Image (spheres, rainbow, N blue to C red):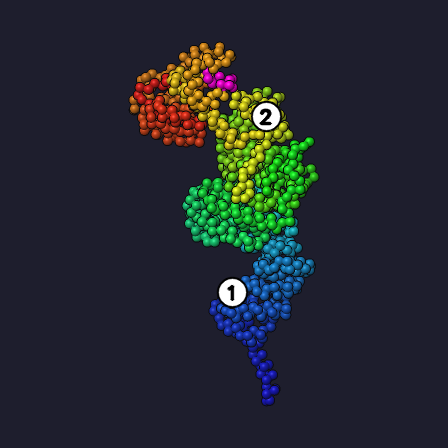
Amino acid sequence: MPARLRRPVEASLRSNREASRATLAVTRLHQRAKRDDSKPCELKDLRDPDVLAAMTPRQLSLVAWSLGKLRDLSSDLGCARGDLLSLVASRASDMDAQGLSMTMWSFASLKVQSHVRVIVGHALAAMSQMSAQGVSNTLWACASLREDQEPLLQLLAEAEADAPILSKLSTCSTQAAANVVWATARLSGGWAMQRTAAQVAKARAPELRAEEAAAVLWALAVTAPKVAVERKERLSVVSVVSEHALRQLHPKSLAASAWAFATLAETGPFWTRFAAATSTALRTESFSSQELAHTCWAFATVVYSQQMAQGLWTDLGAALLGLRKFSATELAAVSWSMAAARFVCPGWSEQFPEISRGCKGMNLRALASVAWSWTTLTFSVSFLEDTVMPAANSEVRFHLQQLDSLDWAKADVHRELLDPLLQLAWAFSFAKVFAEPLLAMASSLAVGVGRRWDLGSSSDGTLSTAVSSPDGDGEQKPRILLKHGGILFLHKPAGWEVDGGRDATQRPGSHPQLSSFLRELSHHPVLRDLACGFGFLGRLDLPSEGVVLAAATYQAYYALRMQQETLALEREYIMLCHGQMPWGLSILRQGIRGIPLSGSIVSADGLPAETHILPCAWLRGHGGEVYTLVAASIVTGRKHQIRVHLSHQGYPVVGDHRYGCHASPSAGTPDMSCRQFLFRYRIAVLGLGEKSEALQVALPLAPDLRAALQALQPLDEASASAWQQWTSGAKPLAFRELEMQQKQKRRDDTAASWAFFTLHGGGARRRLLALSAALKSNEALRKDILAAGSSGALAIARQDPREWACSDLQAKRQRWALESMQEAKMPSGQMARCPECGGKAFVNTGRAGSGRAARLSKQYAHFKCTEPDALREALGLLKLQGGCVALVFCNNEATVEKVAEQLGEHSADYDIVALHEQMPSAAASERLLDLERPSVLVARTSPSFSPKQFRL
């Protein structure tokens, strides 16, 4: 045969042989894939370019599907796999609809990103010709590969416009329905297809496998309500699917159900059923770390609106302790959940450091969640210092070095960088861990991000008007008190809303919003950024008035936020409370739990909260009601923190109808029916820059509050002084200055009392009574003592009481002297002597200067020195006032130590001072002069000591 004829024939035969080999290879591979048999096999035909070239488009799609099914075999192809998949992609235009869906599914299963864009367009264009399973596979592949969103969404919108697609989906399998619902949620598009598939899942809920139910629940929970299935319709599907999950008790579907309802912020009695079903499953089934993390998060999220059974968290804790491996995200979620629910799992704090060391690659967000939860649960700070801080240092330093090349979306920067930085700052600061280098880097990073955003803004934060001053009806409108750089101090009148927590659109009939006032003055984007609270630092309740802090630039906002989270920002308030609050500084640390769509309550499972309160004046209304004017400074800023703390203590704020008294005001008492008597009078911060100066604004009390205060009468001289200061309209003192002022007064009072104690012995009581009465009515004498200090008190102590008494006291002096000699007699010498040490032990339970009845009820109780518990019980009877000292005497030195140790439980209220010197002595005198608050003095006496020398 001539060569010119032989060559075409040979080529044709060779082509037929290659085609036969290709058909045989595809058939064998396809059959193995159907059987899911991934044992080693001969793949040389798939490595032969001639065989591949001979394959039809249908055969290529079958090969791709088979390789996706047999992933282990696909790796055996080596570099030939890339050539094969490249060939498949290049022939996509020749494939039919089924082949395209199979190819898309294969590429997604093998996680092959290359060449995918070539196939996506053809696949979406052919969706109307695909079966329901083909549509499901195509959408699942697009969502898994996370292809470029914009063109994909456009193609998806065109594809779902075809009615046949929706018709096919209405009769699809449960697996296809679950894939469509999941994929459209992941792609944020194809809502008509999602709605159709969701209804299929609802109708066939009993047939859903656990994995399919979990996919449906996740997708419907995260789908944005404005563009996806309407909330009511979504909730209906979630409810039906979850109902069947409760019956199956499968960990995956149970965890997904709880997570979905928590994400949808749904509350109701079904949570009790969820808790019971989950507890049962935890005891009978094995939960994965992801399922446990989702379950913990869900129940911690709803714990604020549902009182969940403690047994559920006990079962969750036992399951958590049984697992040793968590991903960084799971560990952070579990840690946050425990802290949010305030559940302390026994053994968790010991096991957690070991688990965290095995959890590699904790990013900044996970570290922040762990640090926040550790601080909230008040575990040992050693874990924060030894484990969290080094990792956080490394993460923050890395991000600081990459700051100039930061190109994340703003939402991602908030979520992954800025919010974790603020969480870390609060956790280390509240736990009192020395982390200054870390906090300095965190501040530089946060402020640096803010500076970059400011540079990209068309506005520099300049206000369109100058600093305002009150004029006409300015008291009813906000005004700027001080502007320094991008820091703003504003005056918020009562009735204006600090609205950084939600959309600032003015609603008809709503209260005026402070954000609208600021946006009229500046066009900087921070004032429109909801993630930054519209520039506001903290809130002030709607019926309250006072200073509000805001930022006009991103740089200023994050500089102030770092100060706020490191507890360096000073926020101080003055309020009028019902009742007579005990004198002296009090630190309230009760946890506060927020109630959704309501207020807050003090609760043991609440978040940490700290309020410092300082009574300034006791006042009385014309109707006899007693009030206390109270200054407060907050360390944390929980919702309604001051009002909740004071109400819990029994001293609600006047005019507080939510947490306080609802009765109508009596005649002559302050009428606060329209607002509450709570005024934020001072804020102090540090300015911007390395050499920043302190900035502060202090406002005098509002005129209507001053008028209400002027209607009351002070009960004593100290109250009168404070009352005069707050009603005068003068600039008020800072909280710290008020506290120091009261400390100095107590120190002077103690010094004067000790002078009488040492000089007059048994006669000191009568003189102290006279001096106390004189000080209440003689302002000049009080000023002389305060000016003279301890040395002046000694000189005054030598004076005769008649020199201090005013005219109205002269007539009472003789009666005081007579009553002083009619006191209860001391126990007999035999009864008063301790059989163990031979000394005399007693507790003074009387209070000098509180009236005839109190003076005559003064008692001395004697106990054996070997019974220190009895001494502690007697101490419980004491009602110590500011500047008073209770004395416990015994000759046994060991007893002095025991009593002081047992009294340690009172250390939050009293200073416990143990003196080994025998009384009286110079050393004891010096110790007593240093006492700054109500105190208990435990001291030794000699066997011949007589208590009559120490009548206080």
**Nearer-the-camera pick, 74 or 151:** 151
**Nearer-the-camera pick, 712 or 269:** 712
**Nearer-the-camera pick, 18 or 278:** 18
Residue flagged by tag 2: what amino acid is it?
Thr
Q: Residue 19, position in %: x, y?
A: 57, 76
Does the magenta-highlighted stretch encompass residue 300?
A: no
> In which quadrant of the rendered image does the C terminus lie?
top left
Q: Residue 595, position in %: x, y?
A: 56, 38
Total number of numbered discs in the rendering: 2
For image coordinates 70% across by 39% down, the residue present is: 508
| Camera sees residue 698 | yes
Our reading of the magenta stretch's main secondary structure is helix
Q: Is residue 835 above or below residue 101?
A: above
Disc 1: which residue: 71
Does the magenta-highlighted stretch encompass residue 771?
A: yes
Q: Residue 350, position in %: x, y?
A: 41, 45
Q: Is residue 108 above or below residue 747?
A: below
For image coordinates 33% across by 16% down, the residue present is: 828
Region of the chain picked out in magenta, as a range: 770-782
For image coordinates 62% across by 40% down, the residue present is: 499
Q: In what element is the residue under mark 2?
A: helix
Checking the image for residue 554, the label placed there is: none
Q: Is residue 72 above or below residue 758?
A: below
